[in-house]
């Protein structure tokens, strides 16, 4: 994933800086590194530790003046700038149908693999304003949810 991310950034004329935080007590340090490296935006990857600390991640991103693209709308609700991701409720409903089929005797290996079909764009306008960002009206019009 690192190589593909680096290659994608390079093809767009961007510099990718990878900063790790393997535990919650490393978040402050990671944001300090991003500030020192003059990172201009933050992409938060899917991780249980980040999810559990999503409000703290949102707060640190805001204090560090880093616009953040986050994995789910839960992070946006907690202060992240925006997410474009599968709709969690829709995914849970699909998972429930699989559980139902398995409990009724279906063999899990016989069930088809499904991809998410419903994605949502969620924007936290309050965070955008705090960062001094103006969101284009065309982007706001496309959003499934705008948090004021």
Image: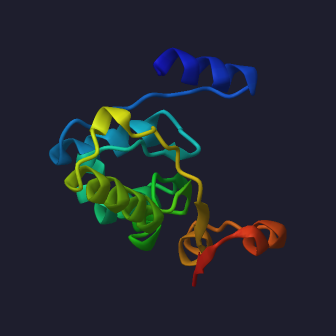
Q: Is residue 115 visible?
A: yes
Image quarter of the C terminus: bottom right
In the image shown, does 58 or 97 lie closer to the viewer? 97
Count all numbered tags in the image, as a single digit: 0
Q: Is residue 30 above or below residue 61?
A: above
Q: Residue at x 52, y 54 (%)?
A: 68
Q: Is residue 53 visible?
A: no
Question: In this image, 42 relative to 92: left or right?
Answer: right
Q: What percent of the width, then of the height, locates residue 138? A: 83, 68
Q: Is residue 52 above or below residue 115?
A: below
Q: What percent of the width, then of the height, locates residue 63? A: 42, 61
View extreme (right): residue:
138
Instruction: Please tell me in which quadrant of the rendered image residue 95 appears.
Output: bottom left
Q: Residue at x 27, y 55 (%)?
A: 99
Question: In this image, 46 relative to 132: left or right?
Answer: left
Q: What percent of the width, then of the height, locates residue 97? A: 36, 60
View extreme (bottom): residue:
148
In the image shown, does 51 or 60 lie closer to the viewer? 51
Q: Residue at x 42, y 42 (%)?
A: 45
């Amino acid at each position: 994933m690192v190589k593909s991310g680096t290659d994608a950034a390079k093809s767009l004329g961007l510099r990718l800086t990878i900063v790790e935080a393997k535990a919650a007590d490393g978040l402050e340090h990671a944001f300090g590194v991003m500030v020192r490296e003059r990172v201009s935006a933050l992409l938060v990857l899917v991780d249980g530790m980040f999810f559990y600390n999503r409000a703290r991640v949102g707060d640190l991103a805001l204090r560090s003046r880093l616009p953040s693209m986050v994995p789910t709308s839960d992070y946006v609700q907690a202060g992240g700038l925006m997410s474009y991701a599968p709709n969690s409720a829709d995914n849970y409903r699909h998972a429930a149908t699989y559980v139902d089929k398995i409990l009724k005797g279906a063999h899990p290996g016989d069930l088809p693999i499904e991809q998410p079909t419903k994605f949502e764009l969620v924007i936290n306008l309050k965070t955008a304003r705090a960062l001094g960002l103006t969101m284009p009206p065309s982007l706001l019009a496309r959003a499934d949810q705008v948090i004021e």
